[in-house]
Image (spheres, rainbow, N blue to C red):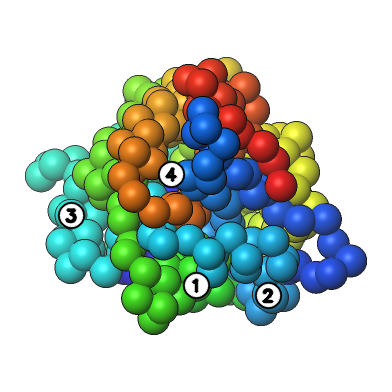
Amino acid sequence: MKRTLLWLLCCAGVSGAAMAAPTLWEVRDAEGGVRAYLFGAIHLCHAACYPLPAAVEAAFTSADRTAFELDVSDPALARTLVKAGRLPDGQTLKTLMPAELYAQLHDASKAVGMPVSQMQSMQPWFASTLLMALAANQAGFTTEAGVDGVLQSRAREAGKPVLALETAARQIEALSGGGERAQEAALRQTVGMVTRGEIGGYLARMVGAWQDGDDAALQTLMYEGSDREAVAPLFATLIDARNLEMADRLETLMAEPGVLFVSVGGGHLVGERGIPAELAARGWRVVRR
């Protein structure tokens, strides 16, 4: 479960010859040399995600180094996650949230087979992540089949360096940000979808949009079931701010020798504030493959 939660920290997030390809970008420098490939991965999936498209496989094989949001082999990650996910002494989810939301949390935890008493000491973002992980597993979507996890394992087997674009502490800071209203809205979104039994269908549509490289659908799904105005501050820190930071990190890595294969959640590569758009604004030649 710790591994599952670590992969889910890498937020937003079935390929065949007849399908449109998931998002893959090529980044070239001013002289036209390829410096990196940016691949929009999905963190939870199933066997139908494979094989990956030929263009993705070719980019991965040709790369000298790989980069992911996190290096989940770091033994300190699980300790950081569990420690950060606990509420301060004297606080509980029951005392923090409205009674009607707590009642929904009780129903959602029952639906995934976890007594609500075991969630009392969790931060709202941690409880939301855990509920999503358990409901996803019930629906047949696992991190073991998640594309970024598979690629990270393959990179190690191939002897390719595995680099991290950020730290677990930074992702936790983003997940827990946005203010109390945004955190409550995000938890309400997850609790509602779990209680209504919608997680399996939601993830199936997410995978379908990822398969087809449908950026607009991915952006819409990121907000589905939520109060968009309420969660906007959370998404600003969870997506927009981290996109800028990861673009900074990528520029540093692309200045070093060797071609880089980058796998991040597909939500980080879409829209006017996505990483490809940010790199293009900085003068890199970014082309969708």
* Location of residue 167 in the rendering, given as x and y in whole percent from the top left corner: 25, 47
Number of the label disc, if any, that sits on residue 86 = none
- Relative placement, left or right, of 184 versus 2 is right
- Relative placement, left or right, of 115 versus 274 is left
Q: In what element is the residue under mark 4?
A: helix
What kind of residue is marked 4? Tyr
Viewer-nearest residue: 237 or 110: 237
* Location of residue 165 in the rendering, given as x and y in whole percent from the top left corner: 33, 46
The image shows residue 167, relative to residue 73, as above or below, that is above
Identify residue for label 4: 102
The image shows residue 86, relative to residue 175, as above or below, that is below
What kind of residue is marked 2? Tyr
The image shows residue 288, relative to residue 264, as above or below, that is above
Q: Are marks 2 and 1 in contact (CB under 8 Å)?
A: yes
Identify residue for label 1: 150
Q: Are marks 2 and 4 in contact (CB under 8 Å)?
A: no
Q: In what element is the residue under mark 3?
A: helix
Number of the label disc, if any, that sits on residue 80 = 3
User: What is the tally of numbered marks visible in this picture?
Assistant: 4
Viewer-nearest residue: 21 or 74: 21
The image shows residue 252, relative to residue 228, as above or below, that is below
Residue at 83% across / 55% down in the picture? 20
Distance Cα–Cα, label 4 vs label 3: 26 Å
Distance Cα–Cα, label 2 vs label 4: 39 Å
Number of the label disc, if any, that sits on residue 50 = 2
* Location of residue 82 in the rendering, given as x and y in whole percent from the top left corner: 21, 58
Residue at 13% across / 42% down in the picture? 88
